[in-house]
Image: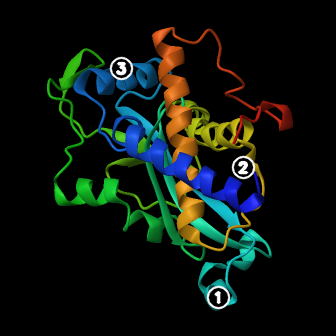
Amino acid sequence: MSPESQRKTFLVFLNAVRTLFGLRYLKRKPTVTELQGIFDGYAARGCPGCVGSVDCMKLHWKNCPRALKGQFHNPRDGKLAAISCDAVTDGDLYCWHWFAGRLGTNDEKSVLVNSPLFMDVLSGRRRMLLPDEYFLDGARRQWLLYFLGDGAYPRWAIFHLPDATPTTEKEKYAAVQQVAARKDVERLSGCLRGRWGIMRRKRHEWSDEIILLIAQVCVILHNMIVSMCKSGELDGEGGAEGGGESGGGGL
């Protein structure tokens, strides 16, 4: 096949995967049972009430058109233009939310206010509560569920941010547990780059739509693998964590 035929075939594959599996593995809310399972997993790790870790990551764009580079280039991210992404994952590295496409000059706060997930939370379309509440220290609580974030996120009730200056032993323990649990989203970033070689390399496409499509398909395939591992259809993680140059898949 000629390079152009390969490119067209690859685009057909990407669109087919997103069309067939996007609603199931990328654009759906967790069920009550799944949400309770995420809650129990974080409670066992010392973070009761947590339902995921959130972070902003960047996709570097080498062939960004010169007319757009002023918007997408942030000197703090290097010489290349970048596209900002927002991700939420649980302890199993299943990505429950993926929002990409904002300018590379955007930071966590500016990406946050445009994120569909958090817009739904702020507007009341998504309630950060369990239907049956939950028990904590032997008492029934009706507190908001929250996400683990870093210090760049605003101090909202749905975010648990690290304590930079803990004083008591209890505060120090809570800070250590928060930092350790929040590494899930950092592991997700490394996992995507480890599994898919195309996520490690610089993006040479001229269109940001193709870059976002590739990233979406990689997240969908990653979620498929995680789901199959949890259901027992796959024996191992297939290089889920820290897969180096040899851990990449066919993409």
Q: Which residue is mark 3?
A: 37
Residue 62 figure quarter: bottom right
Q: Earlier in the sequence, mark 3 or mark 2?
A: 3
Q: Position of residue 228 (x, y in %)?
A: 50, 18
Amino acid type, residue under disc 3 in the picture:
Gly
Q: CA separation, marks 1 and 2?
A: 25 Å
For the C terminus, the quadrant is top right
Furthest residue toward front: 1
How crowded pointer 2 is (Cα within 10 Å; few <14, some 14-19, many 20+) is rated as some
Are the residues tagged 1 and 2 within 8 Å (C-beta)?
no
Q: Which residue is mark 2?
A: 198
Q: Which residue is mark 1?
A: 70
Q: Who's the residue at 78% across and 55% down the image?
A: 201
Question: Compared to 217, does 11 lie above or below?
Answer: below
Q: CA separation, marks 3 and 2?
A: 32 Å
Q: Position of residue 46 (x, y in %)?
A: 48, 24
